[in-house]
Image (spheres, rainbow, N blue to C red):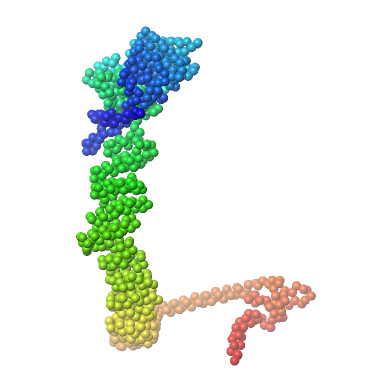
Amino acid sequence: MEETVSKLEQHDFVEQAAEMSHSFVADDDDEEEEVEPKLKYERLSNDITVILKKDAASCIAVHPKFMCLGTNWGALHLLDHLGHSSQQQEFPTHGMAINMVDIDSGGDYIGSCSNDGKVMVSGLYSTENCHTLMVDRPVKAIALDPLYYKSGSGRRFVTGDDRLILHEKVFLSRLKSTTLFEGEGEITNIKWKNRFLAWASTTGVRVFDMSVRRIISVVKKDISPGINPESYRCILYWKDDLTLVVAWADDIKVCVIRRRPDADAERLNLPTHYVEIVSMFIIDSFVAGAGWLGNHLALLVVPKDEELSGKGQRPQMKLVEPHQESYNEISADVLSIRGFQEYSCNEYHLECLAEEGQFFIVSPKDVVLAKPRNPDDHVQWLMEHQKYEEAMEAVTGPQARELKCHSVLQVGRTYLDFLLSKGEFQMAAKLCVKILGKEKNLWEEEVFKFARLHQLRAVTPYLPRGECRLDPHIYEMVLFEFLKTDSAGFLRLVREWSPTLYNIAAVMNAVLEHILRHDPDDTTLLEALAILYSHEKKYDRALAMYLKLQHADVFRLIAQHQLFTTVHDKILALMELDVNQACTLFLEHSEHIPSDLVVSRLQTKPQLLFKYLDALYLKEPKEGSRKFHGLLVSLYAEYAQEKLLSFLRSSDYYPIQDALDTCQQRGYIPEMIFLLARMGNTRDALRLIMGQLKDIDQAIEFCKTYDDPELWEQLIGYSLAKPEFVNVLLRNIGTHVDPRLLIQRIEYGVEVPGLRDSLVKILHDYNLQISLQEESQKILVSDCFSLHERLVRIHQRGMAIRDDQICGACHQKVIVSDPRKPTTGMVVFFCRHAFHTDCLNTVDTCPICYAMKLKPNAGISEKLRKP
């Protein structure tokens, strides 16, 4: 079947007016950028093409259901909006060209008129209310009542020649004709909307209120000088019930019908409505038709030529934004109409379906449908003009759901091809993730495109490696590319990629072959080969390779795959590679790598042995390292003297004499002092402090620590030979030794620096001590008085005796309630035990509490008396 609508290529039908500034805008580089058109155009074909081959269109009327085309031969053709003939009956024809066609709002009746004087109203579904009138003069215009299809509407229609005549159905279905207006020349156009009727005569446009049968306003005819008014018909278009567009040649007016206040209308005998011109301007073309699209006025125009005739010019479709006395041109599309060279402005017609935003452009041999561009058209235009980023935004934005012909995948793949052709490989690779998603086949197709351009390295970072995985050959192809061109990149991929993505054996063989051919000592590829060996679970080869390379990843390999028994003979090599990591490995897995084994392997390397044992001691100061503390003494003495003293103080598991011998060999005085003191030889230790270190402060602290009078005596003896030490002793021994012992031993005449100050300090300390004792005595006395007063108050308190309280001796109630029994006194002790006075031998002590105190001693005495 023939295509319903012949889609016209943009360059074939719509030509942007390059010479007009509104169609092109200049950017910062003074380059012209084409602006996207607002409308798209389709030349109607199908049956309408056959009609126009034999005849020529003279007028058109459009209804939401169909359109009616009048021709120069007087025929009426009923067509759908795609150009198919939908005529189910033959309409009576006119003898001459049809001047005007009109359709009622119900789409049931069609009115037509012609120069042959015939006026016809034809029904599509009924012959009732159809009329054929013959007058003796050409009829230029006809308008049906929008409600003509309704019964009771009067079945009215209006015709225009040199008079405006209203035809309406009256009693007994007779047709009554009434002249509404005459005397101002030929009436060329009539448009009826709701209650208002507008017609154009040679003098201007009149607006008529059909409800009151009265003209409410006149819009005068204003044409620029030099233009022949008879060459251009008046264009009338109702935007809505109250807005009328009037265009005549190059003059355009937008009129709004407003209601006049009722009081003014009655007082001045004026119509209830009037017309206000809200916009009026002159355009640079001749208007052949008018319509409305959104907030913009749509105009079919013919550019002015030098003779101001407009004949032979290519027509244009313009969208303008009207203002009060000017307009802004939004767009201008130059149309390729068949035979436009032979047509004048009056031979073009424009009809508008405002609800659908469609415009029908008619010339004698062509009918073109113009309508707003939809989101698909917008995307297509962006792609044709290589604005792919904007096209991607359009297919991924909020309006993407309205797209029917374009998708992210379609636009994206076109964009990818464009980027590859321009050499934008990085951008294309990055875009693949967004466009291809998880489509395995699409990914493989695009990767092969990169491969053909030798740009696999560009797309590598974006290859899918998760849920969506490509064929292993794709990943192998990428690896081989890096193996040949970038060994560092190859190593990075081997590290990052899962070994399940590719055939490990194939890649490993390729690496071996490459190493043998080019560089057997390529450490980068050897490291990659070690990783591949570990992926292949050939851990012994991987371990040997890492050790050969002296690479720290060997520790990760051992821990990850638990190769602990394998490294028993490689302990020294691991320690030489990285001491810290090796110690961490050995200590964390000591159950597999015993410390005895490590120590035995490191005997020839004492410094490495020290590193290991030091780490072992820090982790397990007692249990795990206890048997090596003796060895640690000599190692600390050799490699870390600063740690030796703290170790000697914290450990109890080393032979003290051996440690002392070691320190003596190296002359480590502080350590010797500690060891001598620990062995009980404090006198020798003090001798070292005073003889070797000559540190009186340390000597004093040492004596304070052990608090031995003999040590103090020894220290005083050492200090007498050095007067400067005497002063220090006087300042510090006051709380431990009687200062007189030192002062009395100072020889007469010996000059002691600072002696006076020291004596003053001793006296001051003594006075301070006496003051403290006195104040303490005062506090003690005060506390004694306070406690005594408290005790007295407690003794003075009353003691509550319950009625049922029992005597601790006779176990009868203490309080005798029987009056026949004699009343005796009672005694209550502070322990709350109560007794009858007669039951007690003494009131000094509670018998119960006294017995409880004696009971433990009695038990001990019993035990002593046993043989």
Specify whether residue 684 is in view.
Answer: yes
Which residue occupies 30% across, 30% down?
Answer: 8
Which residue occupies 26% across, 52% down?
Answer: 457
Q: Quadrant of the N terminus?
A: top left
The part of the image, by quadrant, that contains residue 500 is bottom left
Q: Does residue 495 lie above or below 75 as drawn? A: below
The part of the image, by quadrant, that contains residue 629 is bottom left
The part of the image, by quadrant, that contains residue 318 is top left
**Viewer-side residue, 471 vs 174:** 471
Specify whether residue 292 is in view.
Answer: no
Residue furthest to the bottom? 867
Which residue occupies 59% across, 86% down?
Answer: 860
Q: How many marks?
A: 0
Residue furthest to the front? 1
Residue 865 appears left or right of 311: right
Q: Does residue 598 lie above or below 245 as drawn? A: below
**Viewer-side residue, 717 vs 312:** 312
**Viewer-side residue, 857 vs 434:** 434
| Residue 387, position as x, y percentages in the image | 28, 39
| Residue 794, position as x, y percentages in the image | 60, 73
| Residue 553, position as x, y percentages in the image | 30, 64
